[in-house]
Image (cartoon, rainbow, N blue to C red):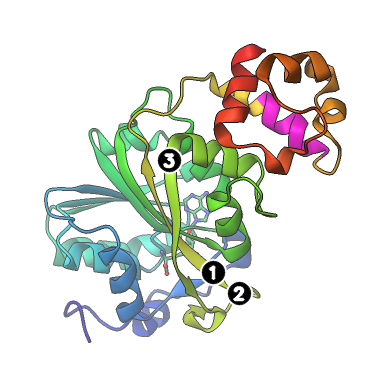
Amino acid sequence: MSLDTLPPLREVLAQHGLDPKKALGQNFLLDLNLTGKIARQALPLEGETVVEIGPGPGGLTRALLAHGASRVVAVEKDPRCLSALADISAHYPGRLEVVEADALKVDLAALAGGPFKVVANLPYNVGTQILLDLVAAPSWPPLWSELVLMFQKEVAQRIVALENDPHFGRLGVLCGWRTEAHILFDVPPAAFTPPPKVTSSVVRLVPRPAPLPAELATLEKVTAAAFGQRRKMLRQSLKSLGGEALLGRAGIDPQRRAETLSVPEFVSLANLL
Ligand code: SAM
């Protein structure tokens, strides 16, 4: 199935000399059926601004536009991709803005300029940091209404993990506190050019309208200490933050380990600090 009348992505890569660069996490999706499937996870797109991080040759960008996104703001670090993206822009006049920048150094909400969704096949080396920056938005609910993001499966499992799951850790606490996060589907290595070593997963996060009140910095402090020594009992791992006394005030058994604490329990510890 073709989503538009633009050339197949393999031709785009050849035409614009886009040899994938490992340092930029360039594992491209060239199958428009798959990019269409990812874009559909963020429906409805009509009337929406979508921020895409790392559009590369534009497979997902094309799918977002073909599925009705009113405006796509695509942030790409690799200048080699710009001419391919300009062709997409010409095909969808006035709907695609390409920003040549490092996504870690720009304010995505400011680029969107209003409510937005984020849909991206993220570069693996910066994906977690981009997610943490979005979840750490200074005011809540944030300007973004939904994130549909591709991660390495192992990272996706950590994002959605809650207590008593071996993948539960700092990412699970922060994402579980402010969002509802689910893995939508896995994507095998063979779907990418070049194939990465590991399976990937598409994750959807939506903001919780009213997360339990807590200060992000304090919550991070407790989480870092608790999971820094995840095999130890909390009375030991939280010693520098008040240990047994702190746990006693929160009504938490000091013999428990970090992995068994719920997000509300982490929040109550943070609020007692
Ligand atoms: N979206 C395309 C696709 O699905 O085929 C490309 C995805 S590829 C996994 C990651 C993309 O992110 C590449 O195009 C890469 O150049 C870009 N990229 C890497 N680091 C970046 C950064 N710090 N800021 C913005 N883009 C970045």
Which of pointers 1 and 3 lies earlier in the amino acid sequence? 3
In this figure, which residue is indicated by the disc labeled 3?
179
Q: Are marks 2 and 1 in contact (CB under 8 Å)?
A: yes
Q: Are marks 1 and 3 in contact (CB under 8 Å)?
A: no
* 222 in magenta: yes
Q: Residue at x 46, y 20 (%)?
A: 213
In this figure, which residue is indicated by the disc labeled 2?
196
Mark 2–mark 1 Cα distance, whole angstroms, equals: 9 Å
Q: Is residue 182 above or below residue 218?
A: below
Which of pointers 3 and 2 lies earlier in the amino acid sequence? 3
In the image shown, does 201 or 34 lie closer to the viewer? 201
Q: Which residues are magenta?
A: 221-229
Q: Amino acid at mark 2?
A: Pro
Q: Closer to the camera: disc 3 or disc 2? A: 3
Q: Residue at x 57, y 79 (%)?
A: 195
Q: Amino acid at mark 1?
A: Ser
